[in-house]
Amino acid sequence: MIFETPRLIVRNLESADFSPFYQMQGNPNVMRYTTGRPDTEKEARNSLKKCMDHYALPDNDFWVWAIERKTDGAFVGTAAIVEENEIGYRFLEKYWGNGYGQEIADGLIAHAIHKMSAKKVIAYVEPENIGSVKILERSKLNFIKEYIHPDDGELVRYYEYEAS
């Protein structure tokens, strides 16, 4: 276990997670604000393998984990802390609207600061992604600015939290 929230456990991804992982990655609604398109089965397999392979890297800065529900062990999504302590999360669409996003965002921030010794935690979100905007607005992260991201030309909102 990496960390837990009141209702969820965050743990390493496993090969056995492929079916729900692919359901999530292959859903156009889930992927709308990430890659903009659903993954094929092959892309999802490669993505899951890449995430798991990163665990063994000595200087890993790409942590993507499984989120499971405590009550029944159901895979509900993924949580991530990547590169410059950027947090991220995705959920299977059937689990949207349950407050899991807020639990995970808050848990990721706490984990980055208290367990990974991060001095700063950041997040990016497209303004149209209303659900994630609401989550970040309620988190410890502070809205800094809205700008056109140079990598993809998309309008993004940038948030950060500096540990004291």
Image (cartoon, rainbow, N blue to C red):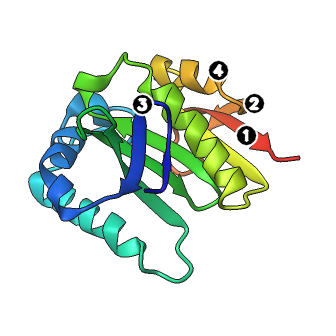
Residue 7 drawn at (x, y percent):
42, 30
Front tag of 4 and 2 = 4
Q: Nearer the viewer, residue 44 or 110?
A: 110
Alpha carbon distance from label 1 to label 2: 5 Å
User: Disc 3 on helix, strand or loop?
Assistant: loop
Q: In the image, what residue occupies the spot 46% across and 19% down?
A: 131
Q: Residue furthest right?
A: 164
Residue designated by label 2: 142
Residue designated by label 3: 7
The local crowd at label 2, few if under 14, some if 14 to 19, many if 20 or more residues have their Cα within 10 Å, is some
Residue 72 drawn at (x, y percent):
23, 35
Instruction: Mark 1 and mark 2 in contact? Answer it, CB < 8 Å.
Output: yes
Alpha carbon distance from label 4 to label 2: 9 Å
Amino acid on which disc 3 is placed: Arg
Amino acid on which disc 2 is placed: Asn
Q: Nearer the viewer, residue 101 or 136?
A: 101
User: Disc 1 on helix, strand or loop?
Assistant: strand
Residue designated by label 4: 138
Q: Residue furthest front?
A: 71
Identify whether 107 is placed above or below 150.
above
Residue designated by label 1: 160
Closer to the chain start, of discs 1 and 2, is 2
Closer to the chain start, of discs 3 and 4, is 3
Q: In the image, what residue occupies the spot 58% across and 62% down?
A: 83
Instruction: Mark 1 and mark 4 in contact? Answer it, CB < 8 Å.
Output: no
Q: Residue furthest bottom?
A: 58
Alpha carbon distance from label 3 to label 2: 25 Å
Q: Nearer the viewer, residue 44 or 155?
A: 44
The local crowd at label 3, few if under 14, some if 14 to 19, many if 20 or more residues have their Cα within 10 Å, is few
Q: Is residue 154 left or right of residue 41?
A: right
Alpha carbon distance from label 3 to label 4: 18 Å
